[in-house]
Image (spheres, rainbow, N blue to C red):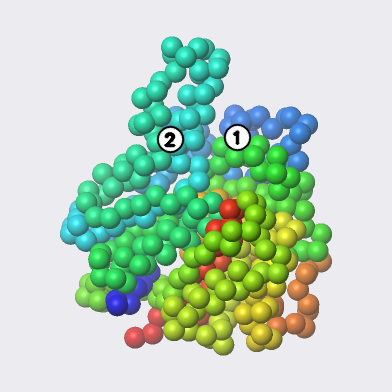
Amino acid sequence: MERVVVTGIGVCCSIGQTKDEFKDSVYNGRLGLKPIDPKRFPTDSACYANKQACVLDQDLYADIEASDETVLTYLGNRVIAEALNDASLVPQELNPHRAGLFVATTIGGSYAFMDFTKKRIQEGIEVADYELLFKASTPNITGSFMRALGWRGPSSTISTACAAGTNSIGRGFDFVAGGRVDVAVAGGIDIFTELSFAGFNSLQSLSKSICQPFDKNRDGLTLGDASAFVVLESLTHAQERGARIYCELKGYSANNEAHHPTAPTPDGSTAFLTMKQALQHGNMTADELDYINAHGTATGVNDSMELNGIGRLMNDRPVYISSTKSMIGHTLGAAGSIEFITTALGIYHSFVPPSCNVQTTMVADEGPIRLVQNRAIDQPIRAALSNSFGFGGCMASIALRRFDN
């Protein structure tokens, strides 16, 4: 099996339109929450719990929407290009059959579907563009990424709810580790729609104020926009070209606990199993962990079950935790990939990423689980986990380690 390393990172979200902007914002605990511009969609209905989200800059969003009927394609291509440039790779110079792309999304072709449905209702079926549904479908979004890269290797589009971003990186890891490709671009993209905002509101999952993961008074999540991709390479390929290495990807696990459409098992038993399996896959133990990037949605059962699972995994051994969602919101299919990136940047730059917005912590002050609050801690991270525990029982965890020759 090949060792797998991270050599490139690309990000665009509410707190940074590039990797470097994002890193600085995470370190300083910057919050991306702002009112949703009515030009994007109206939020004046009394039924909405909140009118805010961690949205992209409205001018950027408007430019994307005007030029790209899928909304996702333009931004995905931009961030994939940043990740490859960060890795000092030119896609056209790679063997097109030895390079793969693994994409996560839950929104996918929803923008085209919504446009089609609105026109069909408002203007009649004769003006509705059925061809648009095909051109802007989820598989064709991934296909457009591959065409832009000029690659002919493996690709996939994963939509396992909130776990999709971690699953896509795990799939890329499997292909590189198995020697089937030399380079994989993996990650996720979701720019939430009026439909998804209304859906989470209907589930009563949206916070009425602000996202407060691991706070006793938490009342739900906020949504966010993000495109986040990494370049994974075999260690051999990376070293042959003298690439910078952010960290090593060691192990990965994915399960489905088959418990409930939206709620996890309260005791955290499947979360524990998933984290344990990721460590075992990487020949690691919990003793090595310095940090866990938690799923941390700030919903009632999710946070408590995750703390149960982490507590069982660590068994009174100290570990830092935080939730990136406190800063950038829940970015749906991109969540696992941008949280993986947060973890990788912390490992490479020797800081422990923070959570924001906590006022009354669920974590005991003197306990082994240590919630990092408001600003990063300057401290090396030897090894870490990044967790994604989503709707439908989809659960995934991925293990990273500081790169040592």
Q: Which of the labelled discs sits on residue 180, or is there none? A: none
> How many C-alpha atoms fall within 10 Å of the one at disc 2: few (<14), some, or many (≥20)?
many
Distance CA(mark 1)–CA(mark 2): 14 Å
Residue at horizontal 77%, vertical 83%?
A: 366
Quadrant holding the C terminus: bottom left
Residue at horizontal 22%, vertical 51%?
A: 152
**Up-down: is 334 above or below 362?**
above
Q: Which of the labelled discs sits on residue 194, or is there none? A: 1
Q: Nearer the viewer, residue 381 or 121?
A: 121
Q: Which residue is mark 2?
A: 70
Q: Horizontal and vertical percent for residue 54?
A: 62, 48
Q: Mark 1 vs mark 2: which is more N-terminal?
A: 2
Q: Horizontal and vertical percent for residue 373?
A: 70, 69
Residue at horizontal 37%, vertical 67%?
A: 173
Image position of 317 (left or right of 385): right
Q: Quadrant of residue 70?
A: top left
Quadrant holding the N terminus: bottom left
Residue 270 visible in the displayed image: yes
Residue type, label 2: Thr
